Image (tube, helix red, strand yellow):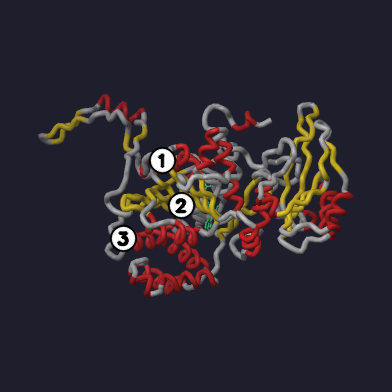
Amino acid sequence: MASKNKPAQFDNRLYYGDNLDVLRNKIHDETVDLCYIDPPFNSKRNYFQIYNNIGGEADRAQAQAFMDTWEWGDEAEEGLRYITNIANLNNDKLTPQTVALIQGLINVLGKGDLMAYLVHMTQRIVEIHRVLKPTGSFYLHCDPTASHYLKLVLDSVFCGGGRNGDFRNEIIWHYRRWTGKAKKFQELHDVIFFYSKTNDVTFNALYTEYTEKSLHRKQHHHTRIKGADVYVTTIDERGVRENDVWQIPGLNSQAKERLGYPTQKPEILLERIIKASSNEGDVLLDAYCGCGTTVAVAQKLNRRWIGIDITYQSISLILKRLKDANRGEQWTAIDQSLLIDGVPKDKDSAIALANRRDDRTRKEFEKWAVLTYTDDQARINEKKGADGGVDGISYFMLDKVQEEFKHGKVVYQVKSGGAQRGTIDNLRGVMESQSAEIGILLTMDAPTKPMLETARQAGKFKHPLLGTEYDRIQIVTVEELLNGARIALPHPAEMVKAAEAIGNNSAQQLLI
Ligand SMILES: C[S@@+](CC[C@H](N)C(=O)[O-])C[C@H]1O[C@@H](n2cnc3c(N)ncnc32)[C@H](O)[C@@H]1O
């Protein structure tokens, strides 16, 4: 977690919250050089984080990362009201083309799931256009499910109402993967739209190496005669200009940079975009961060960055990814100039998070409490039934028997109110059914005397190697958590694969 004494000026900013609120309230006009977003594609499914298989759990542990199912409801109605509010047209927030387009699409598509998705995207694209500098670029990553509608929205926002924006490229990212057996051609590409705010856009042409065939042709057939004209083909030392079809492998299950996050994009894809459309020191924005590929690459390429995500799992993963990739002094320097916004800093904001009702996220308070207390080393538990009372699980090193590590287990319960003695009894029952060595209750309110007494009765756990004793049931208040209390157990196991450290030391080698 970030340290407390920080300079007033931040190089980088990580926001935990809905990107519409963050964009509208925290990001000034014309301050961003490059924005890349990889929002949900309207795929009509939900996505799950896959964890490392520690502790020999029978089924591979996973927890919902984000939802990509949409329906017309209050949020969409409110969005539509905003878009069709004449005041927003008059003050140039929206172009007449955007308003007419959305009204027209409502007539054609009706108020359903696709329209809810498009209203969501339109509002964000409007704000992204506002925060871009005149030299800025926008890359929107999507797939053919809704790309045809999104391009209309982009045209209306960037080029409507006399604005000087321009559509520059439709980049096809082509990859290989196993696909289904539906009665259609295999779907092996994503679409990335590239728009600029004006014609004065930052653009660094990229080059790739010649193929052997074209190099051979240029070397041996470099003169062509057409009528009276003689053409001499020269070999450009830089190679061939990059085109708009990118053959980049997707991340397979064995890929080194893979963190178990669904929809994680390859770093090389972001490298290409960032190198082409920004320079060192420029400000990059990713409003749908996921596990933070954009910010990790921006950091590597010496750009400043702004990241936003609505789930605490993503925020936790991004912080862990940055810490793993930049160790020691490198991380201290990044941490010093990093603003983390939207994460509870006091009890009132913790209560606000506990009371937050958002249909598109779940159990955010529980996730924040568990991941913060464990320094991002726990997995979130969403199973129902026997595991129902467990909000998180983490493991620690117990022993090494014949080259095999034995792990101890910690289960976490989170209570935003109403904890009492029965809560501790319940935790004890869960520990038994889970064969956990330690149980931790993270609670908003201070524990009562009977709670403390019941916890004490659970006794101590003695670490077999270190001989250190730990309370089997521990109670930690949100106040303590906010004051920096963190899990005190030896050698926590990595629940999510560590990002590779920049430099020679692989993160794996640095683990015990
Ligand atoms: C497809 S993933 C991005 C993956 C990312 N490009 C990567 O490489 O990891 C989309 C992300 O958008 C986030 N998201 C969805 N709606 C959001 C919103 N309204 N505000 C902020 N983040 C949102 C989800 O939580 C999810 O992490």
Real-space Cα separation, disc 3 to disc 1, in angstroms = 25 Å
Residue 272, numbered circle? 1
Q: Are discs 3 and 2 less than 8 Å apart at CB?
A: no
- The structure residue drawn at horizontal position 75% and vertical position 44%, both measured from the top left corner, is 57
Where is residue 174 shown, x and y percent of the image?
45, 44
Q: Is residue 378 visible?
A: no
**Residue labelled with disc 3:** 159
Q: Quadrant of residue 302?
A: top left
Q: Earlier in the sequence, mark 3 or mark 2?
A: 2
* Residue furthest left as drawn: 228
Real-space Cα separation, disc 1 to disc 2, in angstroms = 14 Å
For the N terminus, the quadrant is top right
> Type of residue at label 3?
Cys
Residue 37, numbered circle? 2
> Type of residue at label 1?
Arg
- Cβ of mark 2 under 8 Å from ligand 1: the answer is no
Where is residue 11 shown, x and y percent of the image?
45, 44
Q: Callout 2 environment at 10 Å: few (<14), some (14 to 19), or many (20+)?
A: some
Real-space Cα separation, disc 3 to disc 2, in angstroms = 19 Å
> Type of residue at label 2?
Ile
Secondary structure under the numbered disc 1 in the rendered image: helix
For the C terminus, the quadrant is top right
Q: Quadrant of residue 387?
A: bottom right
Where is residue 23 shown, x and y percent of the image?
45, 58
